Each structure stands twice: as structure tokens, then as C-alpha cells.
Amino acid sequence: MTGCPRNRVQATAGISDKVIHAVLFAGVSVSLSALLPRWKAPAIFALTLLLAAASEVLQSQVGREASVGDLMADAVGASFVLGLTLLLNLRHSATSAEPKDPLAD
């Protein structure tokens, strides 16, 4: 997990590091959405994946091991937020549309 000594969180909480990665990068996606409200969900997703990849590369530079599995777990978390965002936007647009009067005009 990015920035934490290896296995400390796993040993303490008994949680897979892949679950932690997914939750962490879901949080990154939500945070980026709040910080960049004009950005569309796919752009936030892409930026989140870029940050996830950068964190793996940086880990390899400081004596840690970069992991494709960790990157995939990060992508799962970001995908969850992307899907949820798109679903909520779709639901909001469906409920906010005014019904058209079939007899008008």
C-alpha cells in the first residue's frame, strides 16, 4: 500500500492490501471530483489511474516493489466511483427532465 510499511495494515486489520488499494483510490476519485467539479467523470477516472501508476513507479524508486496487482486494485476502486457517478448522473437527468405534453404544438 502506498506510503505504508509493508504488511503493517494487513497484520493489524487483517485486510487484504488489494482491498485497501481499491478503497484508497476510490477515495482519491471522490476527492478529485470534489476538487475539480467541472471535470467529467471519465477525466477524473483517467487522472486517478495516472496517479495510481505514478505511485507504483515512485514506490519502485524508494526500495519498494511496484505491483501490477496493486495498480489493478486501484483501477477497481476508481472504476467503482466512475460507475456510481455515471449511474447517479443518469438517474438525476432522468428525474429532472420535464415531461413533454403530447398534445402541445
Image: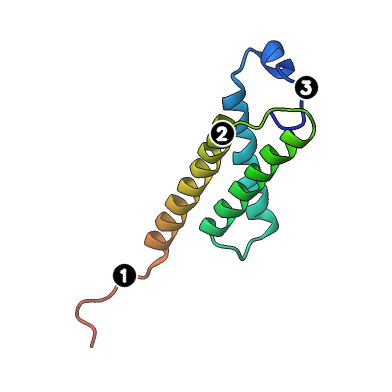
- Asked if labels 1 and 2 touch by Cβ distance under 8 angstroms, the answer is no
- Residue displayed at 59% across by 40% down: 26
Circle 2 crowding by C-alpha within 10 Å: few under 14, some 14–19, many from 20: few
Say what amino acid the circle numbered 3 marks: Pro
Q: Which one is nearer the viewer's eye here, 21 or 83?
A: 21
User: In the rendering, at what x and y percent does residue 69 appear?
Assistant: 55, 30
Q: Position of residue 16 (x, y in %)?
A: 59, 19
How far apart, in angstroms, are the residues tagged by discs 2 and 1? Answer: 48 Å
Identify the element where label 1 is drawn: loop
Q: Where is the N terminus found, in terms of image quarters?
A: top right
In this view, the residue in front, 91 or 76, is 76
User: 10 Å neighbourhood of mark 3: few (<14), some, or many (≥20)?
Assistant: few
| Camera-nearest label, 2 or 1 | 2
Q: Which mark is residue 68?
A: 2
Q: Which residue is mark 1?
A: 99
Left or right of 98? Residue 62 is right
Q: Is residue 9 above or below residue 41?
A: above
Q: Quadrant of the C terminus?
A: bottom left
Label 1 or label 3, whichever comes before in sequence order: 3
Label placed on residue 5: 3
Looking at the rendered structure, the kind of residue marked 2 is: Val
CA separation in Å, label 1 and label 3: 56 Å
Residue 1 vs residue 27, the one in the foreground: 1
Q: Is residue 87 left or right of residue 6?
A: left
Residue at disc 3, secondary structure: loop
Left or right of residue 18: residue 98:
left
> What amino acid does circle 1 point to?
Pro
Residue in view at x 28 percent, y 74 percent: 100
Q: Picture coordinates of residue 79 (x, y %)?
A: 49, 43
Name the front one of labels 2 and 3.
2
- View extreme (right): residue: 62
Q: In percent of the image, x 54 and y 62: which residue is there? A: 40
